[in-house]
Amino acid sequence: MSRIIAALQRHASSNPLKVALQDDNSTLTYGQLLVEIERLSKLLLEGRARAAGGDGAPRPIAILADNGNAWALADLAANAAGIPVIPLPPFFSAAQIAHVISTSGIDQVLTDQAPRLIAASGQADLPAEPFYGNLQRVRLPATTRAVLLPSGTDKVTFTSGTSGEPKGVCLGLATMETVAESLGLASAASRGDRHLCLLPLATLLENIGGLYVPLLAGATICLPGLTNVGLTGSSGLDAGRMIAALSDWQASTAIMVPQMLQAMVAAGQAGVRLPRSLRYIAVGGAPVSSSLLEQARDLGLPVHEGYGLSECASVVAVNRPGDSRIGSVGKPLPHVRIDFADDGEILIYGIRWNGYLGDRVLPQTCDFIATGDLGYLDADGFLFLSGRKKNIFITSFGRNVAPEWVEVNLVTQAGIAQAAIFGEARPFNSAVIVPQPGTSPAAIEAALDKANRQLPDYAQVRAWIPAMEPFTLGNGMSTANGRLRRTEIFGKYASRINALYQP
């Protein structure tokens, strides 16, 4: 039996009136939650028999919906029924949705955005029926080809990757539950927690850290719609609304990407009253500067940086309450062992995954996952990241530079919102900088001078150009979690960057 379902049975027996899920419109206790999961799982299985003719393992279903009780129930019911789930991030473009549909063998989608789904599918008049709350079940044409998922796959999580077509990482429920249990121990999750979901549940980090972890602990999960917590699209953020939501929902835990924390810190420094109910804020998805974490802690925010990747079912390491070191991404989770290749690449042991959707070759047969990230463990067991192996460039003086390391130092400076560093085979490093609104070129120069004083000479930035617009998912300059797409940025600004190196 699923460890999550077993935990729900315990909670329903010992504390049936405890609130499990709460969104803008409804509340479900643990007693009610288990009943609804059982009812909806039977409904999904009946629907699968009609759609597939009962000819073997059920085809996967997709969920395309805003955060809410209905999303959580759809995911849990599918898990209980043994039906693979493919969450579709709400910020995916029509082309990305169509790509997932065409490559994953989905024949049904549970959605609160039926018109958008139908438009993306290129089909007209797709049959739809009520499922739960505002979710409809939309059936795709029988001509949609079946896809053989790797054995043991219960979820396919699509990453935004470095191109327009996302990759599907195939994971088993047992692996995801192992990560959730370890993360619960590391974050000291308890039934007294109120976790507020600030990220889409379709992102693996919130799916596991914001749904599975609190359910295992018997806590309450708060699931308002994303616009009600200040999030629009992949990168639109209303910091005031986010801070108000944390206070209004009396959240004790939350997961943030660095941009959210930066906005919250800026608001606090400007005199905005910050919520005091929080006991644990996990920050991840992209590098976080030590300066930002220190500023957050000075404001009384209990921030803890972590690190993970989809192939490892999300979190690999995280800082813990009472055992945290700024600058590190924390200690490995209990089920994880970390080693390093000769070049410093981080190798993860203790996790099993099923490869990428559509790959004919299973993941590496060795018992570790090569992350592509560089790092080291200190004497106390804290993991530090140095950058991406593939992003390191070598200057014309033979110095290796990890651009992420330099960029994190730049964006902590007043006036710099984003920065992309380049310097392959060059005598010095240059940057494309997105200034904060109203920041003058002179202020950027001063910020660079300050950042350079904290860097060795070979890592310093000697020249820069202003970006024409922020780096976003919408313009193809970053991924959904804020990682820069360096090839695309360089392609856009190549002539201006090259001009910086002219005599």
Image (spheres, rainbow, N blue to C red):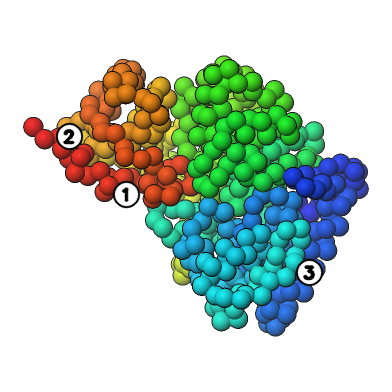
Q: Is residue 68 above or below residue 88?
A: above
Q: Is residue 444 left or right of residue 195?
A: left
On the question of residue 381 being in view, the answer is: no
For the residue marked with disc 2, what is the amino acid?
Answer: Leu
Percent x, y of residue 326: 52, 24
Q: At 67% from the left edge and 64% from the top edge, which residue is drawn?
A: 110
Name the image quarter holding residue 2: bottom right
- State which quarter of the image contains the N terminus: bottom right
Q: Is residue 502 left or right of residue 171?
A: left
Q: First in sequence, mark 1 or 3: give its number.
A: 3
> Counting other residues with Cα less than 10 Å from the Cα at mark 2, is it few (<14), some (14-19), or many (20 or more)?
some
Q: CA distance from mark 2 to mark 3?
A: 63 Å
Q: At 8% from the left edge and 32% from the top edge, which residue is drawn?
A: 503
The residue pinned by badge 1 equals 488
The residue pinned by badge 3 equals 43
Q: Residue furthest left?
A: 503
Q: CA distance from mark 1 to mark 2?
A: 19 Å
On the question of residue 233 being in view, the answer is: yes
Q: At 61% from the left edge and 48% from the top edge, which residue is drawn?
A: 200
> Counting other residues with Cα less than 10 Å from the Cα at mark 1, is it few (<14), some (14-19), or many (20 or more)?
some
CB under 8 Å between discs 1 and 3: no
For the residue marked with disc 3, what is the amino acid?
Answer: Leu
The residue pinned by badge 2 equals 500
